[in-house]
Amino acid sequence: MDATLFTDKYAPTKFEEFIGNVEIVDRVIAWANAWKEGKNPKPLLLFGNSGTGKTALAIIVAKEFNWQLFEMNSSDLRDKESIEKIVGAAISNSSLFSSKRLILLDEVDSISPRDRGGASAILSLLKEANNPIILTANDAFDKKLSSIRTNCEVLEFKKINYLSIAKRLREICSLEGISFDEEAIKEIAKNSAGDFRSALLDIQSLSPQITMESVKALSFRERKEKVFPVMSKIFKGKSISEIREAVDSIDISIDLMTLWIEENIPKQFDFIDTANAFEVFSKADIFNGRIRNRQHWGFLKYSIFLSTCGVGLSRRRDYNFFQPLSFPTLLSSLSKSSSLREVRKSIASKVGEKIHCSRNQVLQDFYYFKTLFEIEKNTVGYIQHFGFEDKEVAFLLGLKEKDKKVSELIKESKDYGKKIVVEKLSGKQSTLFS
């Protein structure tokens, strides 16, 4: 596989490749045809969750209708002067050979209230437009967009159905030679919460083999804001402002972000840059220690700056190859140990109920019980008496849940239980652990 991000490589390039929101696609095509016929319909305001295809659809429209695309994103839409100068020229002038220009104003809800008249400048341009305009936003009902909204046709992008996402992911895996479990692909599609770009990043990060085990580890990631693009900015950003803007947009805890950075420094940098990055990262940890010890939260800004901008800009050179990001090992370990602790508690509850003592008391003496359970003559009787399930038997014997020995012991315990019932009915006295 090459180093191209799947989000770029498999972005839809024509209407037929677009996933989900069929009604909106049809409406946008009708809107574009109206412009082609010489009519002047309202600009479109497309809104909805990230990764549902708002920007992609606008780009496809430009390509399919042979229009020149003029795109501005939130970083360009900063003040009245810049908007009027750049977008104004694009709206008032025709492109080569009198073809239409499609003006794409991306993420207009990211305009800050401090952006000196940016929203009012956009509103003026919408009213004077001689070319088709498409605006995108995550939240079209943001207060600062109220006047813009009334001058546009508003179309809401719904979350993409996970079955549609799964179908496309299977196609891409086949094209890329990625082996996968069918259920794992469905799980990735469900976890994406309708965000196709997020699902693409997931399969690329898990390649060349996608299993349920690897997907489960990935599912612990907080997804309100995608981690991968922000981490990419941290490790590849060229300026403090670029990295800081990415970090400000992420909506996960500082502790979780720090774990992501720590895990991926040696995977993204060479030996020398890794040493440089950890040197800076360690200084951030000093501030974290002072915060914990002194409760002086004013140091937090220094910690965040050092662990993000400091780490990213400590490198000597740019790394242009694609290196998949890894989920923090510590969290995977904690997740696994958490699952094991739950099984341990379940065993203790069942034993405590039978021998009339608390779960905590059984947990205190758990080692002794486990040792008794491992004695072969006790095992089957214990399983039957305490009602242990496959995962509990596997835990006590240090085996995998699907191990053949586990299923055999469960079967023997059921047969043993039937034997006890028969003996009781016949009036014979049965010794439980013979």
Image (spheres, rainbow, N blue to C red):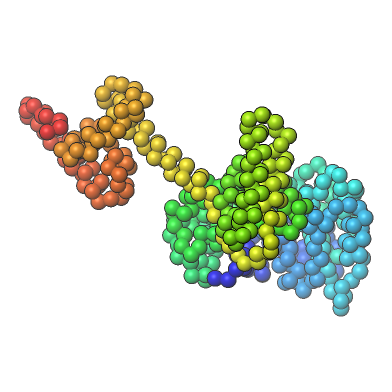
- Compared with 36, 289 (above or below) is above
Identify which residue is drawn at 81% across, 41% down. 143
Viewer can see residue 150: no
Between 415 and 178, the one nearer to me in the picture: 178
- Compared with 88, 330 (above or below) is above
User: Which quadrant of the figure has residue 198?
Assistant: bottom right
- Compared with 342, 132 (above or below) is below
Residue 127, image x and y in percent?
A: 90, 56
User: Which quadrant of the figure has residue 24?
Assistant: bottom right
Residue 117, image x and y in percent?
A: 90, 48
For the image shown, how many numbered marks are present on the structure? 0
User: Residue farthest to the bottom?
Assistant: 97
Viewer can see residue 87: yes
User: Residue farthest to the top?
Assistant: 356
Between 293 and 424, the one nearer to me in the picture: 293
- Position of 336 compared to 115: left or right? left
The quarter of the image holding the N terminus is bottom right
Identify which residue is drawn at 46% across, 62% down. 209
Residue 394, image x and y in percent?
A: 30, 43
Between 80 and 158, the one nearer to me in the picture: 80
Identify which residue is drawn at 63% across, 30% down. 293
- Position of 398 compared to 204: left or right? left
The quarter of the image holding the C terminus is top left
Identify which residue is drawn at 57% across, 56% down. 266
- Compared with 421, 20 (above or below) is below
Residue 123, image x and y in percent?
A: 88, 52
